[in-house]
Amino acid sequence: MNESGLYSILGSSRDSKLLCIQRFVRLFAYGASTLILALYLSNLGITDARIGLFMSMTLWGDVVISFVLTLFADGLGRRRILMLGAVLMSASGLVFTFSGNYWVLVAASIFGVISPSGSEIGPFKAIEESTLSQLSSPDTRSDIFAWYTLLGNAGTAFGMIMCGWLVEWLQSLDNWTATHAHRFVFGVYAFLGIVKFILAMMLSDKCEPESPKQEYQKVTELDNIEIENLLSSSDDNENSPHHPASSQTPKPLPPMPKKKRSILPSISPTSRSILLKLSILFSFDSFASGIATASWITYFFTTHFSLPEGTLGTLFFTTSIIAALSNLVASSISKRIGLLKTMVFTHLPSAIFLALIPLPTTVFPAMTFLVLRACTQNMDQVPRQAFLAAAVLPAERTAVMGMVNVVRALSQSGGPIVTGWLAGMQKFWIAFLIAGALKAGYDLAMLKMFLGFRSREEVEGERLRSEAAA
């Protein structure tokens, strides 16, 4: 129980649980829409190349929306931004329910929230991760992130299997075409956006960032404690009849320097350096993810092996559940070998299996490679979240995580165009090989650049332990 992190999530705050539930609901909606997105567009008569362009423009829109909303989230209020994102999500679902015009759907996907990959899109993830980091201690943070990620993957899994069998059932009814069934799913998507809006309203003020005054007091108090420890150590050495002990009184906090309030974040030079390195590495991984999005993979299995929606939903339900459970294993592994090694050694096998998916000529071996990929596909997410949260200052987390997500989304946006172009030339299999090679290169580069890296929290923890031992 302790290894799984169950005690940590059960003992977490009400807000932490609400954030995890929000993620489940959101990823349920993403999973349902992802299973049918490419099929829906194809049924409308849209070519593969234009489907790829559609997915890329969706991700470009996500870059703008995520950057703007996360940049000002701490200044304007995290709960307000989460509620606004839920409204955009619901509006996109309504447009997809009632419109079949290509450019109207493009506009809805750019200015709203539609996920072509089944994974996170929009401003939610960065804000929620920053809030969870604030609400949790360093000892429980990786466990909280593990369950946060697990519930998201579980939501994707249940959304996909629900969508697959619901679409098959609706098509069995009189006068229900595949397009009608797909639009019904987007109606459910819009409803889930409303549910997420209500959950965001239930969050408390504790989710908002600490005021500059609070952070200043904490930093000053830590400085005073360090000075008092040095003085007490000096007193122990010099305490003699000729050196009477002096009583130390707590030093009052100096007044906080007045600073004009700004909704723009401030990032330290050290954090900027880390952010630059991680952004470069993450861009390669995300571009590969864009080449092999869940929507393209479902489209590949449908067009190459003629899998019906129900079977397709069951297949991706299985892979998503495996990926969800693997996050708990990742949290346990990271406590033993460290965050970075867990990220690399679990992600590398999934890259290899991704490249092997299109090589078989029959469906069963291809499905086997897909399932094997799922076993370690998401095991790097939890340590990556914890690694990034620990590497920067608490006040910088929302902005840094938002910027990282923007870089990932921007890089990912170029992938679908490549896949659409290759699919149109009947070279779909090359996309999987490119994606696998890029992901493997990312893993090896990550290991080379950050092996031996120690976060601020690790350095501070060692200092406190050495002081306690002395």
Image (cartoon, rainbow, N blue to C red):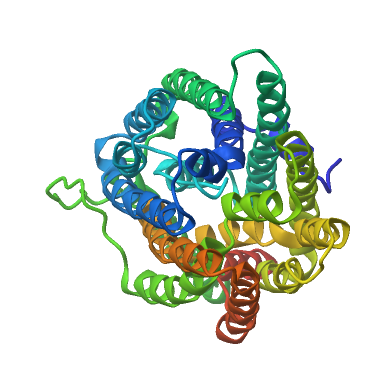
From the top left corner, tell me how far across and down residue 349 is, in percent. Answer: 77, 71
Quadrant in the rendering for residue 158 = top right
Where does the C terminus fall, quadrant-wise? Answer: bottom right
Q: Is residue 252 above or below residue 23?
A: below
Residue drawn at x 70%, y 36% is 309
Nearest the viewer among 27 and 296 is: 296
Quadrant in the rendering for residue 399 = bottom left
Instruction: Say whether residue 220 is visible.
Output: no
Nearest the viewer among 110 and 9 is: 110
From the top left corner, tell me how far across and down residue 261 is, in percent. Answer: 16, 45
Residue drawn at x 28%, y 51% is 64
From the top left corner, tell me how far across and down residue 153 is, in percent. Answer: 67, 43
Q: Which residue is farthest bottom? A: 448
Residue drawn at x 37%, y 52% is 395
Residue drawn at x 76%, y 56% is 374
Q: Is residue 187 left or right of residue 364?
A: left
Q: Is residue 227 left or right of residue 72?
A: right
Quadrant in the rendering for residue 365 = bottom right
Nearest the viewer among 405 and 192 is: 192
Q: Is residue 101 left or right of residue 169?
A: left
Where does the N terminus fall, quadrant-wise? Answer: top right
Question: What is the count of numbered marks?
Answer: 0
Instruction: Say whether residue 66 is visible.
Output: yes
From the top left corner, tell me how far across and down residue 250 is, in percent. Answer: 39, 50
Q: Is residue 456 above or below residue 368?
A: below
